[in-house]
């Protein structure tokens, strides 16, 4: 199963500076794939 909230590679500060990624970091990556609670409930299969 793919876990999108887990980055495949965590970049170092030097790598991020080189890539000029102003807003990206591993915490932003993880939080981008977190769904609000009401959406999680709506997507769960009902028994």
Image (tube, rainbow, N blue to C red):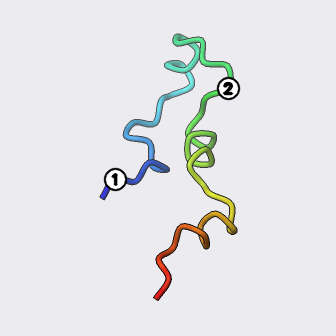
Tell me residue 1's x, y (percent): 30, 59
Return the residue at label 2.
Answer: 23
Which mark is first along the chain, 1 or 2? 1
Q: Nearer the viewer, residue 44 or 28?
A: 44
Q: Which residue is mark 1?
A: 2
Q: Nearer the viewer, residue 14 or 9?
A: 9
Identify the image quadrant of residue 25.
top right
Question: Measured from the top left, where is residue 2 in percent x and y?
Answer: 34, 53
Residue at position x 62%, y 48% in the image: 31
Disc on res. 43 = none
Q: Looking at the image, is 26 positioned above or below residue 4? A: above
**With 6 as the anchor, is 2 left or right in this view?**
left
Classify mark 2: helix, strand or loop: loop
Q: Position of residue 33 (x, y in %)?
A: 56, 49
Residue drawn 56% across and 40% down? Answer: 29
Which percent across, then down, holds residue 46? Answer: 50, 82
Classify 19 as above or below 32: above
The residue that appears at 45% across and 49% down in the rendered structure is 6
Residue extending farthest to the front is 46
| Total numbered labels | 2
- How far apart are the two marked residues, 2 and 1, measured between alpha carbons? 24 Å
Q: Which of 36/7 is in front?
A: 36
Identity of the residue drawn at 59% across and 12% down: 20
Residue furthest out toward the bottom: 47
């Amino acid at each position: 199963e793919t876990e999108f909230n887990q980055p495949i590679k965590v970049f170092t500060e030097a790598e991020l500076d080189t890539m000029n990624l102003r807003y990206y970091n591993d915490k932003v990556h993880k939080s981008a794939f977190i769904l609000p609670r009401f959406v999680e409930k709506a997507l769960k299969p009902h028994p």
